[in-house]
Image (cartoon, rainbow, N blue to C red):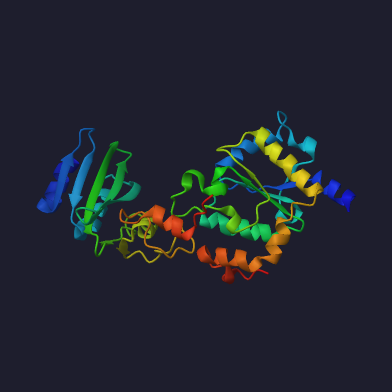
Amino acid sequence: MAIKQWAQGRSLWLMHFCTGCGAVELPPTMTSRFDMERFGIAPMATPRQADVLLVTGYLTVKTLKRVIRSYEQMIDPKYVIGFGSCTVNGGMYYDSYNVINHLDLYIPVDVYVAGCMPRPEAIIDAFLKLRQMIVNGEADGWKKYRENLEWYRKNQRKILDVDKWGLL
Amino acid sequence: MILESIGKRFGDKVKVKERRDGKFDIYVNPDMVLPLISFLKTSKFDHLTFITCVDWIKEKEFELVYNLFSYEIRKEVFVKVRVSREKPEVESIVPVYEIAETYEREIHEMFGVYFAGNDNLTPIFLEDWKGPPPMRKDFNALEYSNEKYEVKNG
């Protein structure tokens, strides 16, 4: 079991889903200057092949729908990193009519990165923290999502017509 | 030049004013929008840049601004129409400029102005939206956001 977690923590494939302005910090993180691949973190095209959903910035209701669908397509174990202050409490969009305030009401978040925007160092730091949590068995957001699905659905239903999608 | 031809054609139903920057404001009543816009299109204003809407809440009116441009004579005109806030309705200009459909959909969604004759006024940006039109001045965005997207203290 420990070997499995050790391996999982060292091979985090990142889903390519850029939701807000935070995505501009990812190219320097990926490329030679900060080079996240030395930690085994690599971008991946489809949700079914990815381990980590990185929500980079603010989420409008329209994007939240796509995020939830992508998150549910990912295969367990799966992890979510909330990126930037927008995912924590709405950030500068706290009074927008179409931007959500708290990401963890709709999908479980394992690690938050504060800042507007976080630097590549902070992103890599968050990934290392996530790796530590995986090795210790603490990153169990995906289990919580299964166990408390009704609670998450209730929050999602408040702003989206989730029942029409035919999921789960 | 356009001043004279508009004056000749529409008389005192429209009011043309030259702005300081050399562009023209044309004020018109809601029932004359379509004739005026189609007249402008035939007199070289072949490009509709955008349509926008201003909420004059104290005067209880919406002002629709049609921004037209002519590539040939390099002039820009703004056609301005006032409609009441209680029953905002104006004739669609889709028969003249097809591109207006998108702008009218947006204004319908954001301000609740109804465009008679545009049969595709479906939601364009907002998804599963159940509140009032959000760009109106009397829409309290902070209150709506706090109620719908919840505020966690601490």
| The quadrant where residue B30 appears | bottom left
Eyeballing the image, is B115 above or below B36? below
Q: Nearer the viewer, residue B37 or A159?
A: A159
Where does the image place residue A140, in percent across and percent down from the top left?
74, 55
The residue under the point 30% across, 56% down is B138
The residue under the point 34% across, 59% down is B94
Horizontal side of B63 relative to A89 (left or right) equals left
The residue under the point 63% across, 69% down is A150
Q: Nearer the viewer, residue A108 or B10?
A: A108
Q: Nearer the viewer, residue B139 or B20?
A: B139
Task: Report the quarter where the C terminus of chain A lies.
Answer: bottom right
Q: Is residue A35 visible?
A: yes
Eyeballing the image, is A158 above or below A59? below
The residue under the point 63% across, 71% down is A166
Where does the image place residue B38, in percent across and percent down from the top left?
26, 54
Identity of the residue furthest to the top in this view: A33
Horizontal side of B43 relative to A29 (left or right) equals left
Where does the image place residue A73, in percent across and percent down from the top left?
70, 60
Task: Report the quarter where the N terminus of chain A lies.
Answer: bottom right
Identity of the residue furthest to the front in this view: B154
Q: Is residue B124 visible?
A: no
Where does the image place residue A109, in percent across and percent down from the top left?
65, 52
Identity of the residue furthest to the left in this view: B12
